[in-house]
Amino acid sequence: MATPDTEPSQLTKWDPKLTERFMSVTRPFLKRYFRSEVRGLENLPAGGALVVSNHSGGMMPMDVPILAADFYAHHGYDRPLYTLSHDMLMAGPTGEFFRKIGYISANHRNADEALRSGGLVVVFPGGDYDVYRPTFSENVIDFGGRTGYVKAALNAGVPIVPTVGIGGQETQIFLSRGTWLAKRLGPIARLARAKIVPISFGFPFGLSLVVPPNIPLPSKIVMQVLEPIDIVAEFGEDPDIDEVDAHVRHVMQRALDELATERRLPVLG
């Protein structure tokens, strides 16, 4: 039986040719349907870096495909863009496909290995808490108190690259994370390991409690890659994790506010 020390590295699964074929199909769709735009790709450093982003879009978030499509179009396929992902995405018959296009299970071992290899690693600290935030709070950076990403960057000795996206939370109307509903469901929610039961409204099913999944509306999605933050240079050799986290979120909130001022209408952008 494989152990964490003997288990083959997920990093070896990345297939640049398959990734290129996949991006050649998805990028035109993303550009037409979501009118996607990624700014600041020149801010991504040549060495390892942790790309920290807000997460939007509910069950079908588009931030990773949009960022990846423009990253590869700008930088080519000599270097993978890894994304730390929930184990559910990596299970079943589609798991191998996702591993081949750069998704890796979200754990400390994978993150550290990918970062130390010189890879760019995308992480969404807020996870499901962030991706299901109510639409009326769509432009608020809130990781739900999670700061592990700071420790991951420090352990690997890499910078944090803050990244923000806008528009994804307009692909349907997100009404509530449903934390109260998860508590009322009690053992049912615990069996599913669910702390939230999100409630949304969209097309074509209307009201949805996770399922049935509505089709994302063609909201214009814009992402902005910001300048890297060298934690040690800015906060010293033994930084306060909470202070670094507050700074990263502040930088991201300021950038997201700027994107919001450009936006004239929901969905249309």
Image (cartoon, helix red, strand yellow):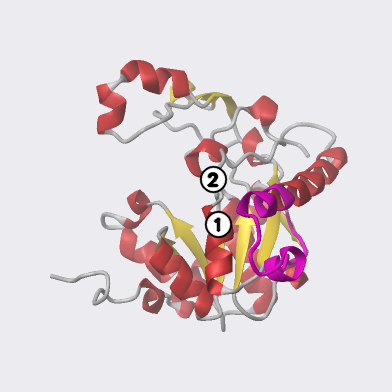
Tell me whether circle 1 and circle 2 mark residues in contact (CB < 8 Å): yes
Per the image, label 1 sits on a secondary structure element best described as: helix
Quarter of the image where one finds residue 118: bottom right
The outermost residue toward the top is: 184
Which dot marks residue 149?
1
Question: Between residues 68 and 190, which one lies in front from this camera angle?
Answer: 190
- Residue at image location 63% in from the left, 49% down from the top: 242
Whether residue 225 is situated above or below residue 199 in the rendered picture: below
- Quarter of the image with the N terminus is bottom left
Point out the stretch of residues depicted in magenta.
224-247
The outermost residue toward the front is: 238
Amino acid type at circle 2 is Arg
The outermost residue toward the bottom is: 78
Q: Which residue is mark 2?
A: 146
Mark 1 neighbour density, 10 Å: few (under 14) some (14–19) many (20 or more): many
Give how far across and how far down residue 254 sits, in percent. 81, 46
- Quarter of the image with the C terminus is top right
Whether residue 105 is situated above or below residue 259 in the rendered picture: below
